[in-house]
Structures are given as structure tokens and as C-alpha cells.
Amino acid sequence: MDAADEARRLSALYDEVLGGHRVPGAPRPLVAASWQRSLAAAVDPDLDSPPVVVDNELLEAVRANHPLRAVLPVLRQTLTTIADEASHIMIITDAQGMILWREGAAAVRRQADRIALSEGAVWSEDQIGTNGMGTALATGQPVQIHSAEHLVRRIHEWTCAAAPVHDPDTGKLIGAVDVSGPLRTVHPAMVALVTAAAQLAEGQLRVRMAAADEMLRARNMQHLVALGDSPGALLTPSGRVLAVQPLEWLPDRLIVPTDTDRVELGDGREGLIEQLDEGYLLRIPGTPIRRTRPSLRLKLLGAGQPLAVVGGREINLTLRRAEVLTLLLLHPAGLTADQLMLQLYGDEGNPTTVRAEMHRLRNVLGGGVLDTKPYRIIADVTGDITDVQAALRRGDVRAALDLYAGPLLARSDAPAVRAERDELDATLRRAALSSADPELLWRFALTSGGAEDLEVFETLAVILAAADPRRPVVAARLDRLAE
């Protein structure tokens, strides 16, 4: 579709949706979800410019220490020439949406200055609503936002594409790469371009990380050798294990505490940490220091990878292993192989399959975590699902919503897991509705279950104040759900 025609269509849709009218179409789900987040953060669609613009001193301090500074030449080579030719600007932000660097066509930079699309301005969703950089950071995925898909009207004359950049060492979000320009410059290839640029930046950071690792090893191996026959390891500043002696088992990464010289090794033992000029030296006592019981933390809610944390060791769980640990977490007294079989597979299961899976799971988690006869968790265990349940039992709906990351093992078809998932969601829903608190109910409406719940939006339509900026979104959602 012609860029101008598409802009007119989006503008009409924008006016209808935010005006609370019935409309034949709807924003893209990505855009609709971003509008909801932005309005929940009290972003005014008539905002003139970003409310946060830092001074040059702070901007220079952030730039000087930001990891993307090291890959600026690569990003310039990849994007700036194209941006100049296509009347765009290239933008790089930090993880909070602050624009650290902006380059490109001079005429476009002058236009961008009128809306504070400039260095030092914070373009996160909670500051200026839906936009390429802020929405890419909020969702963790590449996005293209065009014209009236921006929540703030003053930005409707712009189009932008952005992709997030992650630290290859820790996996944490460190910023975004964005290409923005006037409406006439929209091009479908821009998403692919910024995605490639972000991946290239991550690749360059990975190369630099490998070089730094080799340098750290070369400069500090003497400390490990000096331990003689005593076991130990070299760690990076972030806790990654670089070298071990002798060749005994250690996880790829340890969580290095800041308030003690001891670190859990993930199998019940403790090590002693000594800070070096670069990284750490880990000493593993000859007589293992063992706790009475290791700690186990289970992360089972939401669409992300199910995770077990044993001591300081993170373990990605397959769906079946996550299902087993969910049932054992919710049945602290334990379950037999036959009981687990029925809850996982129904009448079609085989206890032998359960026993084999439990054997593999015990090997993965290490000693002191699981027991047999019956199968049960003997570690000091906590879980996100039980945290939500506890908050609901004490009537703290706000805490329950804070802790609720999404449905329990959403991909699971195990009968018992489905039942637990449905019960948790229904309990949280009823607690939010019964609270009659518009803020709590709005937060529930932002969950995957609440987003499609007609009663929730009908109740919001009644209890939200007449001037509440979220009312148009509620009205639009009601129209769609009522169809």
C-alpha cells in the first residue's frame, strides 16, 4: 500500500479507537498491546515531546561506559550510509531507551530535533508511548512502527524500525538499534536491516568477549597454577567459568555474591572467592562445605523457558521435566511413580517411563534435591507458582499480580498441570474482579487471560473514571470481544 494511503488509514483507525468508537478494524496486536502498556503508564497521546531529556554531562558518562560504544564503527558502516541515502537517521539507545548516538541526513536530524528525537532524550514506552525503540525494548523483538501506530500524535509523521541488542555474556538487554525517518521514507526492508545490524553488533561483542577471556586467562592463570593440587577455577567478572583444575564438574556460570567471599557451586558445596585485578579466583576446599539441604528455585510461569536454579546453577528444563517438578512442588509430601504417571499421562501412561525420567532428572539436578519412595523434593524449594498462591491466600492481590508472569507451563497438556493452571488463573481472575480496584483489574486485563475476558473489560468500563485515558482502549476491546 502507498505510504500516504496507509498513514491516512492508520490515522482514521487511531482517532476511532482512542475516541472509544466502534471500528471495523483494529490495530495490530503488537501495537494494541503497546498502547495498553503506554496508557497504563499514563502517557498522554497529546504529549509534545519526551518528558525526560538528560543533560550532556550525564549523557557523556553513560556513553563512555556503554558496551555498544565499542561497536559504533560497525553500526555506522552498516546503517549510516543507507540512512543518509534514504533520508533516515540511525539511532542507538541504552536499555532504558535513552538515545546515546544519532547520525544520518542533516535535514532529517533537523526535523527530528522538533520532536526531541535527539541524543539524551528517553524514548521508552513509559515515557513517550509506542515507538520503534521503546517497543523493541519492551518486547525484546524487532518492530516497525508507522505513522499513527505511534501513541503520541506529534510523532505520526514518522516511521521507524528498531531491533534490541543483547549482551552475549549475560544475555541481558543493553540497548536498541533504530532507523527512523519521515513517512515517505517507509520501506519494508528496514526491519530486516536493523535486525541484521543488531545481530552484527552482538557478534562483534561476542568476538570482543572471547578476546577478553583469552587475555584474562593469560594474565591470571598463574593464580590458578599456584593452588598446586588444590581444586579451583578462574571466573570472569560476570561469573563465567574460564578455567578449572583439576577437570572436575562446575557449571558454566556461578552467581558471585557481593556481600560474602563464599559462593554456592550448585551441588551442595561451597567455594571461596578471591577478587583479582580481572575476574575472580575460586578455591574449592578439599573437604567440601555442604549445607544441610541445597536450595532449589523453580520458575514455571509465563511463556519463557522453564528454569530450575540449584544453588547458583541455572538449569533449562524440558517441558516434561518442568511438569514433573511442578507436580512435586505442589505435592510436598511426594508422589509414587503410579501417581505421577496418572497426573502426567492419564490412563495411557507407563510407570516405567516415569521412573526413567526421574532418574535422568536426579542426575541433572544433582544430589540432595530429589528423593525416592515416594518421589519428592527434599531441597529447600521455592517456586513462582507457590509464591502467587501464597499471596492470593493472604488476600494480597497486588503482590499476586506482581509475581504472576503468565500461565503455568502454557504448552503443557498433562492433565494435572492443566487443572492447576486453570485453577490458578481462575483464582487470580476472581480476586482481581472482586477487588473492585481499577488499577488491579487493569493489570489483570494486561495478562494473556485477562486480555480476552469480556467480563473484565465490562467491569473496567464501569469502574474507570470518566476522564481515565484507558477508557478508549477498554471500549475498543469491548467492541471486539462482543462481536
Image (tube, rainbow, N blue to C red):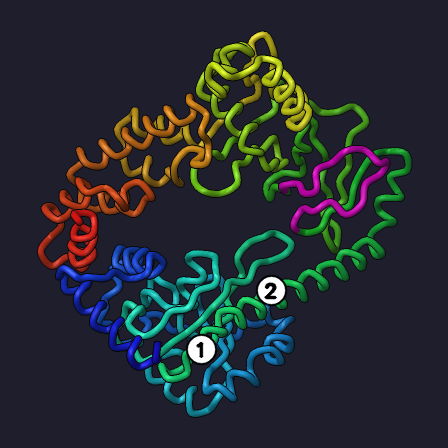
Question: Does dot 1 land on a helix, a strand or a loop?
Answer: loop
Point out the image quarter for the N terminus. bottom left
Residue that sits furthest to the top in the current view: 373
For the point 24% across and 73% down, the residue is 11
**Residue 313 vs residue 162, the one in the foreground:** 162
Q: How far from the left and from the top, in percent, is residue 114?
A: 33, 84
What residue span does the magenta drawing correspond to? Answer: 238-255
For the point 35% across and 70% down, the residue is 52
**Gap between marks 1 and 2, in whole Å?**
20 Å
* Left or right: residue 15 compared with residue 424: left
Q: How far from the left and from the top, in percent, is residue 417?
A: 43, 25
Crowding at label 1, few (<14), some or many (≥20) Cα neighbours within 10 Å? Answer: some
Q: How far from the left and from the top, in percent, is residue 75?
A: 60, 75
* Left or right: residue 61 compared with residue 413: right
- Judging by the rendered image, the residue that carries numbered circle 2 is 199
Q: Is residue 112 visible?
A: no
**Residue 123 vs residue 339, the one in the foreground:** 339
**Residue 75 vs residue 476, the one in the foreground:** 476
Question: How many marks can you see?
Answer: 2
Q: How far from the left and from the top, in percent, is residue 223?
A: 84, 47
Q: Main secondary structure of the magenta part?
A: loop
- Judging by the rendered image, the residue that carries numbered circle 1 is 187
Q: Is residue 159 visible?
A: yes
Residue type marked 1: His
